[in-house]
Amino acid sequence: MSDPRHTPSQIGPNADATRLRIVWGDGEFSEYEPRDLRLRCPCAGCVDEMTGRRILRPEMVPANVHPTAIHYVGRYALQFIWSDGHDTGFYPYDFLRRIWDEGIEAGEAGEG
Ligand SMILES: [Zn+2]
């Protein structure tokens, strides 16, 4: 069950503490803008479970939103406690890895 590509070996801020950095079991790493992660929250309050449509409106999310705590959810996900009070989003590891990989394909990875 434990695909190293979807197993974080290290989670923490990147060098200048502007992004969340995850090092994966296969040696790759991902970095996420905190607000970007908040906007991608997959919980039922942010995404309509029936249609998959995003309910969360970006203008509702403060520009400086950041996680105040990160909890492990079993072996499959992270739960972020956000500075705007939102805490119901579980971010499965394969989801986190996928949005990073999709960002690279879309050319949005930044210079790192
Ligand atoms: Zn949410």
Image (spheres, rainbow, N blue to C red):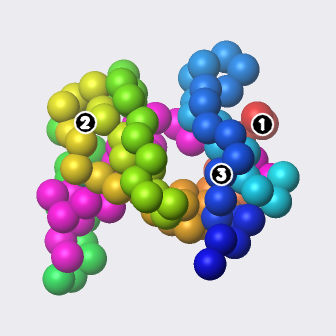
Q: Secondary structure at mark 2?
A: loop
Image side of residue 88 versus residue 79, left or right: left
**Number of residues whose C-alpha sits closer than 10 Å to that of mark 3, classed few (under 14), some (14–19) or many (20 or more):** many
Ligand 1 lies under 8 Å from the Cβ of mark 3: no
Q: Which mark is residue 98?
A: none
Q: Amino acid at mark 1?
A: Glu
**Mark 3 vs mark 1: which is more N-terminal?**
3
Residue where numbered disc 1 is placed: 111
The Cα–Cα distance between marks 3 and 1, rounded to whole angstroms, is 22 Å
Q: Amino acid at mark 2?
A: Val
What percent of the width, then of the height, locates residue 71?
A: 40, 41
Residue at 15%, 58% (x, y): give it.
45
- In the picture shown, does residue 18 fall above or below 105? above
Q: Residue furthest right?
A: 27
Image side of residue 77 versus residue 7, left or right: left
- In the picture shown, does residue 73 fall above or below 87? below
Q: Can you tell which of label 3 and label 1 is closer to the viewer?
A: 3
Q: Which mark is residue 61?
A: 2
Q: Amino acid at mark 3?
A: Pro
Q: Secondary structure at mark 1?
A: loop
Q: Which residues are magenta?
A: 28-49
Pick the residue in front: 36 or 106.
Answer: 36
Quarter of the image containing the C terminus? Answer: top right
**Mark 1 vs mark 2: which is more N-terminal?**
2
Residue where numbered disc 3 is placed: 8
Pick the residue in front: 32 or 70.
Answer: 70
Query: Exactly how many numbered labels are in the figure?
Result: 3
Quarter of the image containing the N terminus? Answer: bottom right
Residue at 64%, 64% (x, y): give it.
6
